[in-house]
Image (spheres, rainbow, N blue to C red):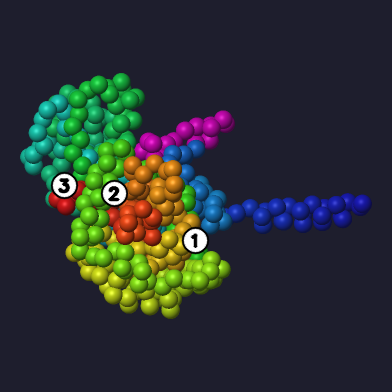
C-alpha cells in the first residue's frame, strides 16, 4: 500500500468516525442535590449527575444527542438562553419571562415543596420566611405575593438559620431538606413540615436550537416517562392518603352509576387478534385524531355518565375508564392513548388479586406517579375490580386518574 492510498483511507476512516458521533446539547443547570450534583472526575473534569440530570441525559441520548452540562448562576443562565449562547437550561419552574424567550419541554422533575418550621412553632401568615436566592422557590414566593425575610446562598445556610431561630420558616424541597439533615447529623432535631405544592420543573430550549432542530423536542418528551421511571414513587403516607381518597371516590361512583351495566353495554371483540389490530390503529391515531371505535365509545350513555361524574370533581379526577375482562375499553370519560389496557399494571394487578388462591385483602391498586401529556399534569391512577352479581368473578376493572397535587393537597376536603 503506497503512502497516498494509506492517507486517503485514514481520512475516510476519520470522517466516518466523526460522522458517527452524536451532536452535543449544551446545557446549563444549578447545583441542587440529589437532583443536580457536581463532582470531579479523574483529570479534573467536572461531571454533573443526579436524578434530574440523569433524566435529561437519558432523554437526550434517546433522541440521538450527547450532552454537555455546566453549573451556572440562574441570572447568567437566563441571559445566555435569551441570547442563544446555550441550547438549554434546566430544571426550572415555568415563568412568563422564559416562555417568551424559549421553548419548554414536558417536566423533567417533580419536587415536593414545604415550609419547614422549627420545634413546635405554629405556621402562620406572618412568619419570617427564608429561601435560597435565585432559586425556583424564591421566584414562586415572589410571584405569589409572599414577603421574603431573608435570601441566602445555599440550603445549608437556611437549615442553620432555622436552628438558630434567625428565621421562622424555610421553604425548600422535601428531599433537599432530608439530605441536609442527614449530612449535618440533625435528623433528631424537631422540624414540622407544611406542604406547599408539587413543583414540576422543566428544560427550556433556546429559540435558535428549536428552529434548527424542530423534531428534537417531540422525541425528547416522548422518552421522559421511561427515563424518569422509579424516581416518582409515592411515600407510604402519600399512598395511604391516596388509597383512602380513592376508596371514597369509588364508593361514591358506585352509589350513583351502575358500573356493571355500563361494562356489559360496551363493545367487545371476538378475538385477541381483533383486539391487537384495533389497538395498533388506535395508538397510531390518538391523540391527534379520534379513532372510529373511540368516537363510538365516547358517545355511549355510560361514557357520558363517566364524563359527568368526572366533571363533578373537576381538577381532582383527570379521567375515568371502565375495562372489561378482556382488558379492552368498555367506557371512558375522555380519549385514551390505548384501546387495550390488558398489558398494564392497573389492569393486571387488580385481575390477579381476584384469581383463585390470591390474597384479596387489598384489591385497590395505586400506580406510581406519571406525567400525563394529554392532561398536562402529573397523576396517579387507582383501579379496583368490578365484580359479577354474585360478588365472585371480576367482570372488569374501574380506573380513575387523579391529579397528584390536587389529591394530596385537598384529600381532607373530599
Query: For the residues marked 2 and 3, what is the alpha-carbon distance in whole angstroms?
Result: 21 Å
> In the image, which residues are magenta?
25-46
Task: Indicate the secondary structure of the residue bearing disc 3.
Answer: loop
Q: Residue at x 56, y 56 (%)?
A: 64
Describe residue 397's horizontal placement relative to residue 189 as left or right.
Answer: right
Q: Which residue is mark 2?
A: 199
Residue 393 image offset from top left, x and y in percent:
39, 55
- Is the residue under label 1 in contact with that under label 2 (CB below 8 Å)? no
Label 1 Cα neighbours within 10 Å, binned few <14 / some 14-19 / many ≥20: some
The front one of 388 and 350 is 388
Nearest to the observer: residue 393 or residue 364 = 393
Mark 2 or mark 1: name the one nearer the start of the chain.
Answer: 2
Where disc 2 sits, the SS reads: strand
Q: Nearer the viewer, residue 361 or 95?
A: 361
The reply to whether residue 410 is in sight is yes
Is the residue 278 above or below the residue 116 in the image?
A: below
- Residue pushed farthest right? 1
Give the image location of residue 111, x and y in percent.
31, 44
Q: Is residue 24 magenta?
A: no
N-terminal of the pair, mark 1 or mark 3, is 1
Disc 1/disc 3 C-alpha distance (Å): 39 Å
Residues 269 and 41: in front is 269
- Identify residue for label 1: 219
The answer to which quarter of the image holds residue 401 is bottom left
To which residue does mark 3 refer?
Answer: 412
Asked if residue 29 lies in the magenta stretch, the reply is: yes
Amino acid at each position: 500500500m503506497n503512502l497516498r492510498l494509506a492517507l486517503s483511507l485514514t481520512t475516510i476512516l476519520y470522517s466516518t468516525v466523526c460522522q458517527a458521533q452524536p451532536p452535543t446539547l449544551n446545557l446549563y443547570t444549578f447545583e441542587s442535590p440529589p437532583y443536580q450534583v457536581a463532582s470531579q472526575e479523574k483529570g479534573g473534569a467536572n461531571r454533573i449527575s443526579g436524578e434530574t440530570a440523569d433524566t435529561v441525559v437519558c432523554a437526550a441520548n434517546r433522541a440521538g444527542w450527547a450532552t454537555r452540562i455546566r453549573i451556572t448562576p440562574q441570572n447568567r443562565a437566563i441571559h445566555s438562553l435569551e441570547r442563544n449562547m446555550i441550547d438549554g437550561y434546566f430544571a426550572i419552574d415555568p415563568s412568563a419571562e422564559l416562555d417568551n424567550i424559549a421553548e419548554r419541554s414536558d417536566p423533567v422533575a417533580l419536587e415536593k415543596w414545604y415550609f419547614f418550621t422549627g420545634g413546635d412553632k405554629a405556621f402562620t401568615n406572618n412568619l419570617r420566611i427564608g429561601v435560597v436566592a435565585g432559586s425556583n422557590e424564591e421566584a414562586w414566593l415572589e410571584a405569589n405575593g409572599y414577603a421574603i425575610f431573608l435570601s441566602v446562598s445555599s440550603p445549608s445556610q437556611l437549615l442553620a438559620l432555622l436552628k438558630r431561630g434567625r428565621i421562622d420558616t424555610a421553604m425548600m424541597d422535601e428531599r433537599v431538606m432530608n439530605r441536609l439533615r442527614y449530612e449535618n447529623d440533625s435528623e433528631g432535631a424537631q422540624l414540622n413540615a407544611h406542604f406547599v405544592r408539587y413543583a414540576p420543573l422543566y428544560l427550556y430550549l433556546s429559540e435558535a436550537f428549536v428552529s434548527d432542530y424542530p423534531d428534537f423536542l417531540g422525541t425528547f418528551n416522548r422518552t421522559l416517562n421511561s427515563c424518569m421511571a422509579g424516581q416518582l414513587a409515592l411515600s407510604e403516607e402519600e399512598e395511604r392518603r391516596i388509597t383512602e381518597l380513592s376508596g371514597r371516590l369509588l364508593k361514591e361512583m358506585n352509589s350513583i352509576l351502575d358500573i356493571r351495566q355500563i361494562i356489559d353495554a360496551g363493545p367487545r371483540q371476538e378475538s385477541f387478534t381483533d383486539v391487537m389490530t384495533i389497538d395498533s390503529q388506535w395508538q397510531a391515531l390518538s391523540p391527534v385524531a379520534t379513532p372510529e371505535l373511540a368516537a363510538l365509545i365516547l358517545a355511549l350513555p355510560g361514557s357520558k355518565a363517566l364524563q359527568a361524574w368526572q366533571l363533578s370533581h373537576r381538577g381532582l379526577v383527570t379521567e375515568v375508564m371502565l375495562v372489561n375482562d378482556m382488558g379492552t375499553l368498555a367506557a371512558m370519560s375522555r380519549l385514551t392513548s390505548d384501546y387495550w389496557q390488558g398489558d398494564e399494571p392497573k389492569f393486571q394487578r387488580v385481575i390477579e388479586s381476584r384469581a383463585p388462591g390470591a390474597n384479596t385483602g387489598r384489591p385497590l391498586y395505586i400506580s406510581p406517579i406519571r406525567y400525563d401529556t394529554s392532561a398536562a399534569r402529573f397523576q396517579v391512577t387507582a383501579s379496583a375490580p368490578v365484580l359479577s352479581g354474585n360478588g365472585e368473578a371480576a367482570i372488569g376493572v374501574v380506573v380513575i386518574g387523579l391529579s397528584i397535587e390536587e389529591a394530596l393537597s385537598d384529600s381532607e376536603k373530599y
